[in-house]
C-alpha cells in the first residue's frame, strides 16, 4: 500500500474553526489545493484528559467535535489519519469502569496490567523500577474496587494526575486484542486510510528491562497489529521517541517512521549559523520517514538525539529557545539523563517563534523539510506561522499549550493574509506538484554556511540553496528547457 508523497496537515478537530464541520469549510475556503497528502486529525474521540490522548473509546466521535459522518465527508476528499493509543485507555472507559466495579471478576479485568502480572508477589523490585524509562514518578496507580474495597495497583505509564487517567493495556490479553480489533475495524468502516500507533514503544512490560521498545516482543505485537491493519486496508505509522538506532530498526523492517531528529537539526543550523551537522544527517538518514518541524508536543531532544549531539551544543540551542519564549519538558528517570545533568526531553514553542519570528528563516526551514526525503507534515499552528501562545500557559500545568492555540474563523481569515503564510502555501504547492520529488535525492557539496539539496527525475530537476548567514533560500527548477528561480 503506497502513501501519497505530498504534504499532510496535522490538526486537532477543533483547532481550525471549532469543530469538524468547520474544519471542512476552512479547508475548502483557504486550503483547497494544499493538503493533497491527507490530514492527520489528532484524537477526536471522547476523552478524559491529555487533549484527547486519554480516549474512552474509538467507536464514537466526541459530540462537540461532530460525528463519524463529518469524518467520512473529510475522507471523501482527503486521506485521513487517526491515532490509536495502543498503550492505554481512559480510566473513564466502560472497560476500566467495569473493572473498578467488579475487580478481578470483571470481563475486562485481563485487559489491564495488575502488578502481579509483572511481580507475582506484588512487590516491585527497586533496582528493576530504576531501569524503567519513566514518564511519571512511578509507573503505577492505585485504585479501589467498589465491590470489595480492595486496592488494586495497575500499570499507568502516562498521566499527570494521581491516580492516572490513562490506564495501560495488556496487549497480550485476548480481550485487549479483541477490542483493538474492533477499534481498527471501525476505522476501516469509516474510510480511515492510516493509523498512527501512539506510544507503541511502551506496550511491552517485562522485568529487568526499561519497559520501552522491548525486543523481540515489540515486533511480535507490531506484526500482529500490522497484519490486522493491512487486512482492513489501513496503513500503520508507529510513533516511537527513541535513540536513532531504535528508529532505524523499525525502518529496516519496512515500517514508516517519524523523523524526530530533523526539527532540531534544522533549528540548530539557523541558530548556530552552521549547516555541517544537518548536512551530514541528511546524507545518512533513512528515506522512508514522515517529516515534521512542529507538532502538538515539542521539539524532541532526549532520547531522540542521544549519541548525535553533545550536551554543550544542546544547551546552547535550548537556552536560545527559552530566551525566545519557549519552555521545556524534562526527563523523569535519573538513569536516562545525561551524566552532566542535562535532562531536556522536548523544547516547547511554535517553530516560527523559536526562529525569532523571522519570515525568511521560517520559509527556508520549511523548504529544507520539504526537500528532505519523506512525507512532509505541517502542524496547523505552523501552517499559520503562529507565535508562542504565552497567555495559554499562565497557570497551566501543561507547557505544551504554548503551541496549541485554537484559531477562530476571524483569526484564520487574518492569518492567511500574512506574507509568510502566502509564501508557505506557494512552497507547499510546489512540493505537491513538481515531479522531481518522486525521483532521486542528493545532498550537494557546500560550505558550513550553506546547504544545497537536489531532486531529479527525467527532465525535471530542482535545487534548494539555503544561506544560514542571511536566512535566505532559493529554489532553482527546470521548466521545459528554462531554469527558473523560486523564493
Image (spheres, rainbow, N blue to C red):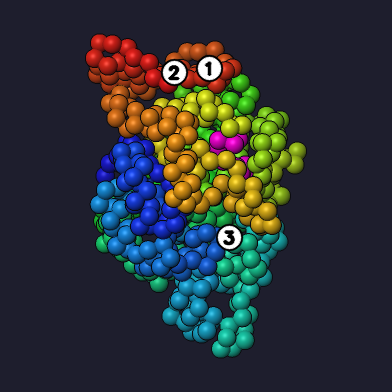
* Mark 1 nearby-residue class (10 Å; few <14, some 14–19, many ≥20): many
Q: Please state the horizontal and vertical placement of residue 323, each as a whole percent of the image.
A: 70, 36
3D distance between C-alphas at marks 2 and 1: 9 Å
Q: Of discs 2 and 3, which sits in the foreground?
A: 2
- What residue occupies the far right of the structure in this picture? 340
3D distance between C-alphas at marks 3 and 1: 42 Å
Residue 59 lies within the magenta run: no
In the drawing, what numbered circle is on residue 474?
A: 2
Quadrant for the N terminus in the image:
top left
Task: Magenta stretch: give its range.
Answer: 345-354
Residue 381 seen in the current view = yes
Q: Residue at x 57, y 40 (%)?
A: 387
Q: Residue at x 67, y 29 (%)?
A: 313
Q: Quadrant of residue 33?
A: top left
* Residue 193 appears left or right of 57: left
Q: Which residue is mark 1?
A: 467
Mark 2 lies on a secondary structure that is: strand
Residue 128 seen in the current view = no
Amino acid at each position: 500500500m503506497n502513501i501519497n508523497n505530498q504534504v499532510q496537515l496535522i490538526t486537532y478537530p477543533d483547532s481550525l474553526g471549532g469543530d469538524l464541520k468547520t474544519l471542512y469549510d476552512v479547508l475548502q475556503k483557504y486550503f483547497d489545493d494544499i493538503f493533497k497528502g491527507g490530514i492527520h486529525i489528532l484524537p477526536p474521540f471522547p476523552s478524559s484528559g491529555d487533549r484527547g490522548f486519554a480516549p474512552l473509546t474509538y467507536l464514537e466521535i466526541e459530540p462537540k467535535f461532530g460525528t463519524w459522518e463529518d469524518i467520512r465527508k473529510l475522507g471523501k476528499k482527503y486521506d485521513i489519519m487517526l491515532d490509536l493509543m495502543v498503550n492505554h485507555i481512559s480510566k473513564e472507559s466502560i472497560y476500566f469502569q467495569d473493572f473498578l466495579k467488579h475487580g478481578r471478576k470483571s470481563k475486562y479485568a485481563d485487559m489491564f496490567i495488575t502488578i502481579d502480572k509483572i511481580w507475582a508477589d506484588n512487590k516491585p523490585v527497586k533496582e528493576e523500577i530504576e531501569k524503567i524509562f519513566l514518564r511519571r514518578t512511578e509507573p503505577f496507580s492505585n485504585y479501589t474496587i467498589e465491590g470489595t474495597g480492595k486496592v488494586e495497583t495497575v500499570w499507568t505509564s502516562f498521566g499527570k494526575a494521581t491516580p492516572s487517567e490513562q490506564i495501560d493495556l495488556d496487549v497480550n490479553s485476548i480481550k485487549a486484542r479483541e477490542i483493538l480489533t474492533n477499534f481498527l475495524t471501525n476505522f476501516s468502516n469509516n474510510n480511515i486510510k492510516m493509523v498512527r500507533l501512539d506510544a507503541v514503544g511502551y506496550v511491552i512490560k517485562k522485568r529487568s528491562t526499561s519497559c520501552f521498545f522491548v525486543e523481540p516482543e515489540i515486533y511480535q505485537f507490531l506484526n500482529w497489529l500490522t497484519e490486522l491493519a493491512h487486512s482492513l486496508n489501513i496503513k500503520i505509522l508507529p510513533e516511537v521517541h527513541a535513540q536513532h538506532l531504535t528508529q532505524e530498526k523499525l525502518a529496516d523492517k519496512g515500517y514508516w517512521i517519524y523523523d524526530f531528529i530533523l526539527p532540531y537539526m534544522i533549528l540548530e543550523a539557523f541558530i548556530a549559523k552552521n549547516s555541517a551537522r544537518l548536512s551530514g544527517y541528511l546524507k545518512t538518514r533513512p528515506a522512508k520517514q514522515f517529516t515534521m518541524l512542529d507538532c502538538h508536543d515539542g521539539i524532541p531532544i532526549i532520547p531522540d538525539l542521544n549519541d548525535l549531539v553533545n550536551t554543550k551544543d544542546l544547551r546552547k540551542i535550548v537556552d536560545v529557545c527559552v530566551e525566545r519564549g519557549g519552555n521545556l519538558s524534562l526527563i523523569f528517570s535519573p538513569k536516562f539523563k545525561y551524566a552532566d545533568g542535562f535532562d531536556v526531553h522536548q523544547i516547547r514553542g511554535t517553530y516560527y517563534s523559536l526562529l525569532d519570528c523571522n519570515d525568511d528563516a521560517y520559509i527556508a526551514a520549511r523548504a529544507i523539510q520539504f526537500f528532505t526525503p519523506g512525507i512532509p507534515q505541517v502542524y496547523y499552528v505552523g501552517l499559520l506561522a503562529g507565535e508562542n501562545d504565552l497567555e495559554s500557559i499562565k497557570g497551566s500545568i501543561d507547557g505544551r499549550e504554548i503551541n496549541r492555540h485554537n484559531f477562530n474563523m476571524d483569526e484564520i481569515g487574518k492569518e492567511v493574509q500574512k506574507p509568510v503564510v502566502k509564501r508557505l502555501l506557494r512552497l507547499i504547492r510546489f512540493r505537491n506538484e513538481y515531479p522531481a520529488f518522486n525521483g532521486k535525492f542528493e545532498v550537494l557539496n557546500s560550505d558550513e554556511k550553506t546547504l544545497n539539496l537536489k531532486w531529479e527525475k527525467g527532465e525535471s530537476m530542482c535545487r534548494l540553496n539555503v544561506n544560514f548567514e542571511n536566512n535566505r533560500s532559493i529554489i532553482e527548477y527546470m521548466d521545459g528547457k528554462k531554469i527558473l528561480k523560486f523564493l
